[in-house]
Amino acid sequence: MSVRELVVLGTASQVPTRHRNHNGYLLRWDGEGILFDPGEGTQRQMLRAGVAAHDLNRICVTHFHGDHCLGLAGVIQRINLDRVPHEVTAHYPRSGRHFFDRLRYATAYRETVRLTEVPVDADGVLATTPAYTLEARRLSHPVESYGYRLVEPDGRRMLPDRLAAHGIKGPDVGRLQREGSLNGVTLEAVSEVRRGQRFAFVMDTRLCDGVHALAEDCDLLVIESTFLDEDRQLAAEYGHLTAGQAARAARDAGVRHLVLTHFSQRYNGAGEEFERQARAAGFDGELTVARDLQRIPVPKRR
């Protein structure tokens, strides 16, 4: 049975707190696992969340500030220690390659796993698989930063009443799906488009075109809301979003489930206020103020 869910490993921004670890997010997408922004302590949070090194197929780093990448050293060494049997691919801003290299080889260890680096240096598609296309978009932050977007290909949903009307049943249904037509009946005549699901991961950024492009029509959007609205000047100065800004972007993009995260330590325990400001900004979809070790399912298809 396929599983599509977000496992939240950490939700703090620059400084972790007693209740919030540095960033870390695992997206389970059917049989694959994509780890986003492994901050300090990610390896231990994986253990607490029941996430194994073998679950990782990709690592996506938005930028090279410590709360988004200091866990790389431990995670990379762990996948080698556990001899993960498959290739692991790492995406990160090409301008920060020297930081990635330092973290990858921070200490001595034995390399047993093929870790392929595919750096990002422009908007566009990073990978295409049968299950999804992975894209990147440039964000607005003091250092080069990219957000990531995963799009499932559209499929088709078979319509039982139309199949019955044409007398198509049993193995013939599969044959029609494979071949596109059967005895003069086309696939389009007995099915409808099933829209692929969409996920986006948006970290440290001001509002910019990249935010809107990543969020568009997402089923699940994970987005930073480092500050509350009263501190919007600080947000602009340091290249971040407020709860209201993140929520308005999600509202305008038609997001179904909004996940707010990456909270400044100055607001420890203020989760209800982040939710209140997001609702005040007009977002009326499903809303989660993320907590460490939380599991958030990708919404079911419409």
Image (tube, rainbow, N blue to C red):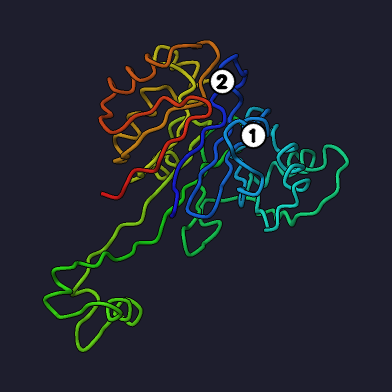
- Is residue 169 left or right of 85 when viewed as pictured? left
Q: Against 174, is 114 above or below?
A: above
Q: Picture coordinates of residue 24 (x, y %)? A: 58, 33
According to the image, label 1 marks what residue?
Answer: 47
- Image point (72%, 46%), residue name: 79
Q: Residue at the spot x=34%, y=62% of the render?
A: 154
**What kind of residue is marked 1?**
Leu
What residue occupies the far front of the structure in this picture?
170
Q: Position of residue 46 (x, y in %)?
A: 62, 35
| Residue located at (59% from left, 43% from top) | 35
Looking at the rendered image, the quarter that the N terminus falls into is bottom left
The earlier-in-sequence mark between 2 and 1 is 2
Snapshot quadrant of residue 249? top left
Pair 2/1: label in front: 1
Residue wearing tag 2? 20
**Horizontal side, residue 50 vs residue 278: left or right:** right
Q: Is residue 72 toward the left or the right of residue 125 in the image? A: right
Q: Quick check: marks 2 and 1 in contact, CB under 8 Å?
A: no
Q: Residue at x 48, y 65 (%)?
A: 130
How many neighbours does mark 1 have within 10 angstroms: few (below 14), some (14-19), or many (20 or more)?
Answer: few
Q: Secondary structure at mark 2?
A: loop
